[in-house]
Amino acid sequence: MEHTRTRLILGMIVLAAVSRLLPHPPNFTPIGAMALVGGALFGSSAAALGVPLAAMLLSDAVIGFHHGMPVIYACFALTVCIGFSLRGKRTLARVAV
């Protein structure tokens, strides 16, 4: 069971990283969505923070590192924290807002 969970998490990281490399519409942020939903749904806070940040780091290794990374990564961490506030009281309206 643990092996399956690890493979799922690694697959999510790779898929999210690839999503940054493919052409996409402006302001389409699958990693942002992953951060919000991960914060709300993942049982582990470390996984909720680690998955989107690892995906960002992996894709930045391909795209190129830049000086704005600390601020961008902090914003994704804040998105995960917003997801934490949805734990136990998830509704479609709250997640949409």
Image (cartoon, rainbow, N blue to C red):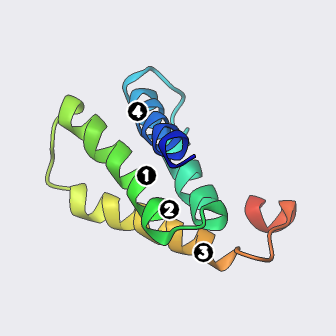
Q: CA distance from mark 3 to mark 1?
A: 14 Å
Residue 51 at what x, y percent from top left?
43, 52
Determine whether 24 is above or below 54 in the image: above
| Secondary structure found at label 1 | helix
Circle 4 Cα neighbour tier, 10 Å, few/some/many (<14 / 14–19 / ≥20): some
Q: Earlier in the sequence, mark 2 or mark 4?
A: 4
Q: Which mark is residue 69?
A: none
Disc 3 residue type (three-letter): Phe
| Secondary structure found at label 4 | helix
Residue 70 at what x, y percent from top left?
23, 63
Q: Residue at x 55, y 38 (%)?
A: 28
Q: Which residue is tagged 3?
A: 84
Q: CA distance from mark 1 to mark 2?
A: 6 Å
Q: Which mark is residue 48?
A: 2
Q: Are marks 2 and 3 in contact (CB under 8 Å)?
A: yes
| Secondary structure found at label 2 | helix
Disc 1 residue type (three-letter): Val
Q: Residue at x 51, y 66 (%)?
A: 79
Q: Which residue is tagged 1?
A: 51
Q: CA distance from mark 4 to mark 1?
A: 10 Å
Q: Viewed as shown, does residue 43 lie left or right of 77?
A: right
| Secondary structure found at label 3 | helix
Disc 2 residue type (three-letter): Ala
Q: Earlier in the sequence, mark 2 or mark 3?
A: 2
Q: Quadrant of residue 67?
A: bottom left
Q: Is residue 29 visible to the viewer in this orientation of the structure?
A: no
Q: CA distance from mark 2 to mark 4?
A: 15 Å
Determine whether 60 is above or below 92 in the image: above
Q: Viewed as shown, does residue 9 lie left or right of 60?
A: right
